[in-house]
Amino acid sequence: MGARVTVTDLSEFIDLMRHNVDSNVKVIQQRQGVCHVLELVWGVSLPTLTLPTLTSDCPKPSLILLADCIYYEESLEPLVKTMVSVSSQDTLIICCHEHRTTDNKPRLQKQFFEEVSKHFRVTRIPTILQHPVYSSDDIHIHIFRLHDQPPS
Ligand SMILES: C[S@@+](CC[C@H](N)C(=O)[O-])C[C@H]1O[C@@H](n2cnc3c(N)ncnc32)[C@H](O)[C@@H]1O
C-alpha cells in the first residue's frame, strides 16, 4: 500500500514539484499512494498550517524526510520551529546532510543540532548500518523524535 505524502518547498519550486509528481503519477496510483504539493515557508504559517494528506485519524505525519536542509543561518530556527509544529510524539524525522567543512558550514551544522536537541532526541545512524552502496562517509543520517512531554 502506498503512502500519503505531502512534498513542500518555497513557491518558486511548486511547478517543478508538480511536474515531478505528475511524471510519477502512474506509479503512485498503482501503489494506491497519494502525493500532494504544498508551499511551505519554514517558520511561517504556523500553527495554522494544515498538511493536505493528514486526516483526523492521522493528524500529524508519521514520517518526515529532511534532506540537505542545513545550509543558511536565517533558516535554522524557523526550520526547527516547523519540525516541532508538525510533529507528534509518534513522528519519526529522518534527516540527512552532507558533512561540509567550508566557510561557516561547520558552525551552522553545530547550531542546527543544538537547536534540534532542545526539542528532539537525536540518534545518529552509523554508516555501517546504512545501505552498503547508497551510503557515504560524508553523508550523515540522524533520526529525531520529540522529547517525552512531562505528564500533565
Ligand atoms: C539544498 S536543497 C535540498 C532539496 C531536496 N530536499 C534534496 O535533497 O534534493 C534545500 C531546499 O530547501 C528549500 N528551502 C530553503 N529555505 C527554505 C525556507 N525558508 N522554507 C522552506 N523551504 C526552504 C529550498 O528551496 C530547497 O529546495
Image (tube, helix red, strand yellow):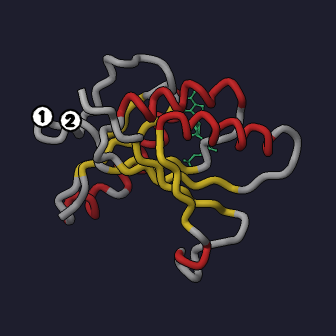
- Above/below status of 23 relative to 38: below
Outermost right residue: 103
Q: Residues within 10 Å of mark 2 (few under 14, many from 20)?
A: some
**Residue at the image position 40 percent from the left and 41 percent from the top:** 146
Q: Position of residue 24 (x, y in %)?
A: 35, 58
**Residue at the image position 74 percent from the left and 38 percent from the top:** 108
Depth check: give the residue in front, 138 or 53. 138
Depth check: give the residue in front, 33 or 130. 130
- Above/below status of 13 relative to 68: above
Label ID, residue 56:
1
- Specify whether residue 34 is in view: yes
- Specify whether residue 18 is in view: no
Question: Seen in the image, is 10 located left or right of residue 64?
Answer: right
Q: Position of residue 100 (x, y in %)?
A: 78, 52
The N terminus - image quarter: bottom left
Depth check: give the residue in front, 116 or 34. 116
Question: Seen in the image, is 102 located left or right of residue 16?
Answer: right
Q: Given the image, on which type of amino acid does mark 1 rest?
A: Ser
Q: CA distance from mark 2 to mark 1?
A: 5 Å
Outermost bottom residue: 132
Q: Which residue is mark 2?
A: 59
Q: Given the image, on which type of amino acid does mark 2 rest?
A: Pro
Question: Seen in the image, is 128 located left or right of residue 151?
Answer: right
| Circles 2, 1 touching at the beta carbon (< 8 Å) | yes
Q: How many marks?
A: 2
Q: Residues within 10 Å of mark 1 (few under 14, many from 20)?
A: few
- Above/below status of 86 relative to 63: above
**Residue at the image position 57 percent from the left and 74 percent from the top:** 134
**Residue at the image position 33 percent from the left and 46 percent from the top:** 91
